[in-house]
């Protein structure tokens, strides 16, 4: 299998890593060969096994969407983890609107993003015109709903109380499940 991805110039160095270490680790862990054209920003992934190959593509996409290699590599540690990307370009008409939406999701000093990550056990990266999330399907659904609420203009307090309610429901479900 072969796939080519376009990676932003400012993320190529992150993907390659110091002394090529990130690229090398990714190739080893996914049994793939990765070649990078720094001029064009094209990354070519080649692999024999479908699952590791697709995981390599996902890790590269995660790094391209602003995740650190450490956070992106979490996709390799748990096969149930997914990467979801929300494109804001269709929602925001102007750069100013885009900044406002990103600001609402990040929050003052990054606190809103951290709070959503903490309450949903997901990882969130806000970069350019996208918001990327890494998490388990059920957690992603809740985090996505919280982000959608913020995009639609819901007050942060309303979003956090929604998340708290979801967290209590999931705790209750676990209690019900085990007892």
Image: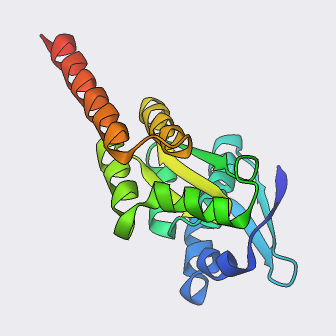
Q: Is residue 122 above or below residue 34?
A: above
Residue furthest to the bottom:
19
**Residue 21 position by quadrant:** bottom right
Toward the viewer: 73 or 62?
62
Q: Is residue 122 above or below residue 108?
A: above
**Residue 60 position by quadrant:** bottom right
Residue at left offset 60%, top offset 58%: 62
Asked if residue 106 shows in the view, the reply is yes
Residue 169 appears at what percent x and percent y? 26, 21
Asked if residue 73 shows in the view, the reply is no
Residue at left offset 45%, top offset 66%: 70
Toward the viewer: 152 or 164?
152
Left/right placement of residue 35 relative to residue 114 reads right
Residue 105 appears at what percent x and percent y? 48, 54
Residue at left offset 57%, top offset 56%: 101
Toward the viewer: 166 or 50?
166
Residue furthest to the right:
40
**Residue 135 position by quadrant:** top left
């Amino acid at each position: 299998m072969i796939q080519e991805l376009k990676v932003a110039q400012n993320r190529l160095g992150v993907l390659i890593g110091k002394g090529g270490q990130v690229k090398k680790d990714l190739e080893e862990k996914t049994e793939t060969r990765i070649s990078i054209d720094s001029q064009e920003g094209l990354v070519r992934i080649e692999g024999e096994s479908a699952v590791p190959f697709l995981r390599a593509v996902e890790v590269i996409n995660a790094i391209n969407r602003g995740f650190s290699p450490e956070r992106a590599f979490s996709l390799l540690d748990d096969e149930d983890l997914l990467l979801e990307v929300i494109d804001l370009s269709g929602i925001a008409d102007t750069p100013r609107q885009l900044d406002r939406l990103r600001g609402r999701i990040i929050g003052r000093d990054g606190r809103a993003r951290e709070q959503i990550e903490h309450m949903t056990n997901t990882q969130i990266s806000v970069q350019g015109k996208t918001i990327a999330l890494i998490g388990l399907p059920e957690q992603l659904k809740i985090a996505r709903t919280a982000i959608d609420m913020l995009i639609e203009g819901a007050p942060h307090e309303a979003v956090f109380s929604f998340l708290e309610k979801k967290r209590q429901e999931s705790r209750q479900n676990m209690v019900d499940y085990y007892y």
